[in-house]
Amino acid sequence: MSVTDNIVDLKATLPENCTLVAVSKTKPSEAIQEVYNSGHRDFGENKVQELVEKAELLPKDIRWHMIGHLQRNKVKYIAPFVHLIHGIDSLKLLKEVNKQAEKNNRVIDCLLQIHIAKETTKFGLDKEDVNDLLKSDELIVLKNVKIVGLMGMATNTKDEDQVIHEFNELKKIFEELRPLSGTHDLEMTHLSMGMSSDYRLAIEAGSNMIRVGSKIFGERNYA
Ligand SMILES: *Cc1c(COP(=O)(O)O)cnc(C)c1O
C-alpha cells in the first residue's frame, strides 16, 4: 500500500465534519508531496525546525499544524505561516504567539491543550487552569490570537475503556466551554483528539479533528 492508498482509504471512513491532520513528523518531504498530490492539504509536525524546513521545500498552500510541545523562544520561526497551533498550555505561551503574530500582521488560531491522560509526562492544562486562563483579563487584549478549540491526547494504553473515558472527559470540557464562544476572542469549534491507535474511539466521543501519522506514513524509525 502506498501512502496515497492509505490516506484515501482512511478519508473514506471519516465523517464529513472531521478534519484529518496527516502527521508527517520524521517522514521525508517526498512522502508529504505524494500525499499532497492526492489533494490533501493539512499536515502536522511536532518539531519547529523540521516544520520550518519542510514548509520551505513544499507547496505554499499546505496548512501546517504545529502539534507538539512549543517552546516560547521558537514561536517566531513558525509565526509567519503556521495554520493552527494545537499545543497551547500556558498564558505565557499564548502571549508570545500573540506578539509574534502581531509582528507578522496575522491572527493565529490556537487550541488549548488539555491534560486528560494518566501519564504525567504529557503536557497540557488542567480543567481549572483552562477556566483561569479563559477568565483572565490578559486574554482580552491578545488581539492576534484566537482560541478555536481544544486538543488532548489519551493515555497510551490498550485499555479502551480508559481511552474512551478520557476522550469523553475532554468532550465534556469542550461542551462546557462552548457557550463562551463569541467572547474573549474565543470560538469553540475544533476538538482535536485521536491518533492512529485511537481515532475511531475519539470520533465516537465527538472529535472533529484527528491527528494521524503512522497509519498513513507507516511506522516511524527514530534510530
Ligand atoms: C505523533 C503524534 C500524533 C500521530 O501519532 P500516530 O500514532 O503516528 O498517529 C498525533 N498527535 C501528536 C501530538 C503527535 O505527536
Image (spheres, grey):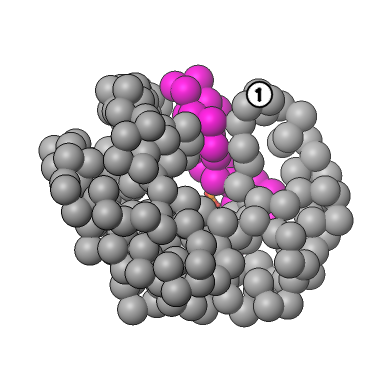
Circle count: 1
Instruction: Decide if residue 160 is in sight here.
Output: yes
Q: Position of residue 222 (x, y in %)?
A: 52, 71
Crowding around mark 1 (Cα neighbors within 10 Å: few <14, some 14 to 19, many 20+) is few
Residue at 68 percent across and 78 percent down: it is 56
Q: Is residue 66 left or right of residue 124?
A: right
Q: Up-down: is 207 above or below 66?
A: above
- Residue 199 part of the magenta-drawn span: yes
Residue at 36 percent across and 43 percent down: it is 185
Q: Position of residue 198 (x, y in %)?
A: 49, 35
Instruction: Decide if residue 115 is in sight here.
Output: no
Residue 64 found in image quarter: bottom right
Which residue is at the front of the view, 94 or 20? 94
Which residue is at the front of the view, 16 or 94? 94
Residue at 80 percent across and 39 percent down: it is 8
Residue 147 found in image quarter: top left
Q: Up-down: is 82 above or below 145?
A: below
Q: Which segment did they paint magenta?
A: 194-221
Q: Up-down: is 220 above or below 114?
A: below
Q: Is label 1's Cβ within 8 Å of ligand 1?
A: no
Which residue is at the front of the view, 121 or 223? 121
Amino acid on which disc 1 is placed? Pro
Residue at 50 percent across and 20 percent down: it is 204
Q: Is residue 10 left or right of residue 104?
A: right
Q: Is residue 68 left or right of residue 200?
A: left
Q: Position of residue 217 (x, y in %)?
A: 69, 55
Q: Is residue 198 left or right of residue 129?
A: right
Numbered disc 1: secondary structure: loop
Q: Position of residue 86 (x, y in %)?
A: 43, 51
- Residue 5 part of the magenta-drawn span: no
Determine which residue is flagged by label 1. 15
